[in-house]
Image: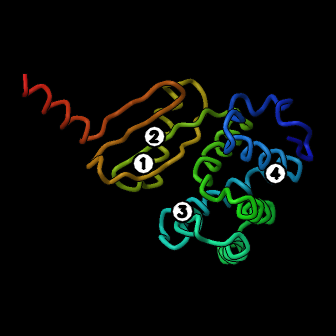
Amino acid sequence: METSGGTLSGNPATGGIQASLSGRYATALFDLARDARSIEAVEASLGTVREALAESDDFARLTSSPLVARGDAVKAVDAVAQALSLDPTTRKFLGVLAQNRRLRDLPAIIRSYRELAARHRGEMTAEVVSAHPLSDDQIAELRQALRQRVGRDVAVDLSVDRSLLGGLVVKIGSQRIDSSIKTRLNTLAHAMKG
């Protein structure tokens, strides 16, 4: 597969991300964004798309339903991109995904792109799942704690899972730190069974 930046396999910044189809799409988007000097703008737009997917059932259905005709999906995604004020690169990319019937891969593409952008900045990426949305101060404290733990800057990929009840689950590299109340309760229940 070729992009305007060359072949995907020749890009050292992508590491092992391109193994999956969503990884290849993310790598192609990253290459386009790098060439357009819009890595941060695309990352911000993808963050907006991710929030829209989490907050809008209609948008989530649009991206996941096989029943939406290709042309209708392209038009709908373009309208959503305009309404969300996405940057031109991301807007065109969403159109390509709709045309190729790959909108269902958006969450994985967004994760892979964020990882590529973090690596480009010399950061590691931590996937953080919390029971409730974190405040800006909590995010700053978390980044600082993770930075001390791994010895370099850490980009935080946040999501919410209310079933955790409280606490956090953090995955950074091959490490997993689970301080959720749900896990603590399950551990206590197993210990009480004897």
Residue picked out by circle 3: 51
The residue at 78%/50% (across/down) is 29
Dot 4: element: helix
Mark nearer the N terminus (4 vs 1)? 4
Which residue is nearer to you in this view: 140 or 122? 122
Type of the residue with mark 1: Gln
Pointer 2 and pointer 1: residues touching (CB < 8 Å)?
yes
Q: Position of residue 82 (x, y in %)?
A: 71, 76
Type of the residue with mark 2: Leu
| Mark toward the viewer: 4 or 2 | 4
Give residue 11's quadrant in the image: top right
Dot 3: element: helix
Q: Position of residue 96 (x, y in %)?
A: 77, 60
Instruction: Kindly identify which numbered label has been placed on residue 33.
Output: 4
Q: Residues under labels 3 and 4: Cα distance?
A: 20 Å
Pointer 2 and pointer 3: residues touching (CB < 8 Å)?
no
Looking at the picture, does residue 107 appear above or below residue 176? below
Residue picked out by circle 2: 142
Q: Residues under labels 4 and 1: Cα distance?
A: 30 Å
Q: Position of residue 49 (x, y in %)?
A: 61, 62
Mark nearer the N terminus (3 vs 4)? 4
Mark nearer the N terminus (1 vs 3)? 3
Looking at the picture, does residue 169 appear above or below residue 87? above
Q: Residues under labels 2 and 3: Cα distance?
A: 21 Å
Give residue 123's quadrant in the image: top right
